Amino acid sequence: MSAALEPGWLKVLEPEFEKEYMKNLKAFLLQEKETGKTVYPKGADIFAAFNHTPFDKVEVVILGQDPYHGDGQAHGLSFSVQKGVATPPSLKNIYKELETDIAGFKTPNHGNLTQWADEGVLLLNASLTVRAHEPGSHQGKGWEAFTDQAISQLSDKKTGLVFLLWGKFAQQKAVLIDEKKHTVLKSAHPSPFSAYTGFFGSKHFSKTNEILIAEGKKQINWQIS
């Protein structure tokens, strides 16, 4: 699996591929395939978050939990779906917040966030795969150890990153982040069940840009075309 990883990420994560948990995970994924299970995203997209946002280019991290489990949705970036697929409710709420937070932002007619990834926003799910139509089906199989290591490596080896932790699950990852070196912004999850309890009005997108500018970095262009 490691061959598909961007060189900068491979440099910091290569030891993980030799660990027992990763070998077990690979065996589990092969078993899923051999028993006729459909797994999302497709193999070439499993590491898309890393490959669109090289280790050296990461400036912002948005953490999700699981890939989308519906047909044609997941393509390896948290909260993002492929063009031509209906925009999921959580992403609709992210766009709503952007409209009130970022002057001139207009909600796009699709949910593909690849532009953010290419700008330095790591769109990372804790689990990188899921069985079709079965949310959470690949949790606890090893992915969390791998993605926790990715967060730890970012915290250890970089400075001035902004981590956006939405909801309780993402906020549990704060223990992996050195807040003396990085900024952690927390809010409710953008899901329709919780967006009104603190996600709306959090202004995380404008705050992120203010932090990046203060660090002498380029701000993120949040507008998706």
Image (cartoon, grey):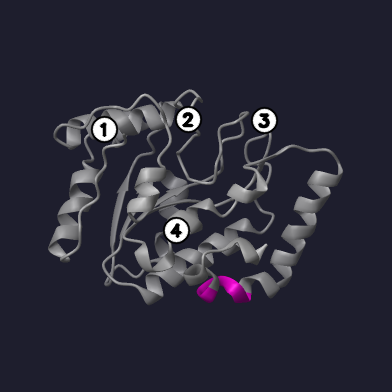
Q: Which residue is mark 2?
A: 83
Is residue 13 covered in magenta?
Answer: yes
Magenta segment's dominant SS is helix
Would residue 164 be seen by someone viewing this image from the given angle?
no
Q: Amino acid at mark 4?
A: Lys
First in sequence, mark 4 or 3: give its number.
3
User: Which is closer to the viewer, label 1 or label 4?
Assistant: 1
First in sequence, mark 4 or 2: give its number.
2
Distance (Cα) linking label 4 and label 3: 26 Å
User: Which is closer to the viewer, label 1 or label 2?
Assistant: 2
First in sequence, mark 1 or 4: give its number.
1
Rendering coords of residue 164 (x, y %): 34, 51
Q: Which residue is mark 3?
A: 133
User: Which is closer to the viewer, label 4 or label 3?
Assistant: 3
User: Which is closer to the viewer, label 3 or label 2?
Assistant: 2
First in sequence, mark 3 or 1: give its number.
1
Distance (Cα) linking label 4 and label 2: 30 Å
Q: Secondary structure at mark 3?
A: loop
**Range shown magenta:** 11-15
Distance (Cα) linking label 3 and label 1: 28 Å
Report the disc number at residue 173: 4
